[in-house]
């Protein structure tokens, strides 16, 4: 049986005619830049995220970049980011001329460890950028408390966490600004690149709207240097079709996660830990094992797709060598990079596919621990 890590075609088939109609409407209108579809999506995604304002941009990366630019972060400034994240989080900090300072993660959640965060703060710190990795939010209360005490901004990288919650608050709504991505593998994915900034700050919203269009206002008058960070209305039209399904799709991911959790209980596989204060959207279901490469090979032989998010922590990336970090500086992040592997979790997985993945993994784990009871644990759910 084949179980790919992600299958976008099944989801597309379920909404095909609506997507084609929506794309057709944009083509007929020939409003090819911004326009009503982008405005409608901004309103809907802001509301979904518990924010007053949304600004559609060209990608999640450009959302982070525009946020840093709009907040005036640049040369001489430091921004604290986790090391165990997608590259864009830190890459954007360097692109605006500031310095990423890498913070350690909590081994259970893979998110920024609030207890260790404070040590990374210096006189130059301008912002903290918590990343809500794999669909679960960071422990935001202590992060916000530390930020407030030191007078620094909080930019949420919520690229993997649209509509996830922490104590009932939505991802992106707790800091100064939140950055979302519509990359096709995200829970709300476009048919190409796209992203959005969400905020409750009216002045920042104004500045972001101008920033994404070359800092231009009025026409051909440039208040500051911005960029072309505009969201494409074709993407907005497709995303508007998908948006009403988002909660149900995320629920499907949680259901699949619960089946995995039950099957792997009592084996040597460690399953994701979700805080009782959070609702995760399970953008990824990430397990860990010391024998990861062996497990990946076993899964591949049995038709199961996997991916490693992320194999090299950012403080050890070649492009950041000048920052002076070395192996051993962030041991929790380094260990996660050696042990994690993501399994197929998308909502359209069939029961048979999930059972196949469970059986293949429990058999493998059972050979090592002598306890391989996949049937029993699946049947009990
Ligand atoms: C996907 C992602 C981004 C970047 O989003 P793009 O839309 O691909 O540019 C940034 N940060 C994290 C954590 C992501 O997962």
Image (cartoon, rainbow, N blue to C red):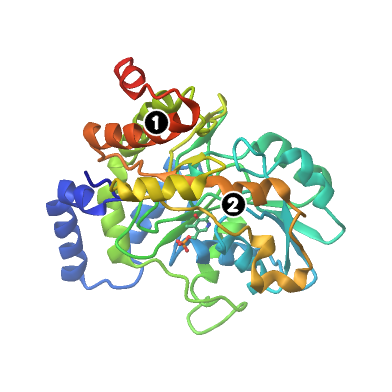
* Residue 303 visible, this orientation: yes
Classify 10 Å Cα crowding around label 2: few (below 14), some (14-19), many (20 and above). many
Nearer to the camera, 261 or 225: 261
Real-space Cα separation, disc 2 to disc 1, in angstroms: 22 Å
**Residue pointed to by mark 2:** 337
Classify 10 Å Cα crowding around label 1: few (below 14), some (14-19), many (20 and above). many
Q: Is residue 269 above or below residue 89?
A: above
Q: Secondary structure at mark 1?
A: helix
Nearer to the camera, 9 or 34: 9
* Extreme residue toward the top, this view: 380
The reply to whether the residue tagged 2 has its Cβ within 8 angstroms of ligand 1 is: no
The C terminus is located in which quarter? Answer: top left
Which residue: 27% across, 58% down?
237
The N terminus is located in which quarter? Answer: top left
Nearer to the camera, 235 or 129: 129
Q: Is residue 267 above or below residue 287?
A: above
Q: Is 247 on the left or on the right of 220, as rendered?
A: left
* Residue 207 visible, this orientation: no
Residue 336: percent from left, percent from top: 61, 47
Query: Which of the two discs, 2 and 1, sits closer to the camera?
Result: 1
What is the total number of numbered labels drawn onto the structure image?
A: 2
**Residue pointed to by mark 1:** 362
Q: Secondary structure at mark 2?
A: helix
Quadrant in which residue 359 is drawn: top left
Q: Which mark is residue 204?
A: none
* Extreme residue toward the right, this view: 123
Residue 211: percent from left, percent from top: 55, 70
């Amino acid at each position: 049986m084949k179980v790919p890590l992600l299958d976008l075609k099944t989801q597309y088939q379920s909404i095909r005619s609506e997507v084609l109609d929506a794309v057709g409407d944009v083509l007929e209108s020939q409003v090819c830049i911004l326009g009503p579809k982008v405005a409608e999506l901004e309103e809907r995604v802001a509301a979904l995220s518990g924010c007053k304002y949304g600004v559609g941009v060209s990608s999640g990366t450009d959302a982070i970049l525009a946020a840093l630019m709009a907040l005036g972060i640049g040369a001489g400034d430091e921004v604290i980011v986790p090391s165990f994240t997608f590259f864009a989080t830190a890459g954007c900090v360097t692109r605006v001329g500031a310095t990423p300072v890498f913070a350690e993660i909590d081994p259970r959640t893979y998110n920024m460890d609030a207890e260790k965060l404070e040590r990374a703060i210096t006189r130059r710190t301008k912002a903290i950028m918590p990343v809500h990795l794999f669909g679960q939010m960071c422990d935001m209360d202590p992060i916000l408390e530390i930020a407030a005490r030191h007078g620094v901004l909080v930019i949420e990288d919520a690229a993997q966490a649209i509509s996830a919650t922490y104590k009932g608050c939505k991802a992106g709504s707790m800091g100064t600004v939140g950055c979302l991505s519509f990359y096709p593998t995200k829970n709300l994915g476009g048919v190409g690149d796209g992203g959005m900034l969400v905020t409750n700050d009216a002045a920042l919203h104004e500045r972001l709207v101008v920033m994404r269009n070359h800092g231009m206002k009025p026409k051909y008058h440039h208040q500051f240097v911005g960029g072309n960070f505009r969201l494409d209305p074709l993407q907005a039209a497709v995303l508007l079709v998908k948006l009403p399904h988002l909660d149900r799709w995320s629920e499907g991911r949680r259901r699949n996660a619960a089946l995995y959790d039950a099957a792997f209980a009592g084996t040597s596989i460690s399953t994701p830990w979700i805080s009782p204060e959070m609702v995760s959207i399970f953008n990824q279901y990430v397990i860990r094992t010391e024998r990861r490469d062996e497990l990946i090979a076993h899964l591949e032989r049995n038709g199961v797709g996997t991916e490693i998010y992320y194999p090299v922590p950012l403080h050890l990336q070649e492009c950041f060598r000048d920052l002076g970090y070395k192996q051993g500086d962030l041991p929790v992040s380094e260990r996660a990079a050696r042990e994690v592997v993501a399994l197929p979790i998308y909502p359209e997985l069939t029961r048979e596919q999930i059972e196949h993945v469970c059986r293949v993994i429990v058999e493998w784990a059972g050979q090592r621990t002598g306890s391989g009871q996949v049937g029993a644990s699946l049947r009990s759910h």
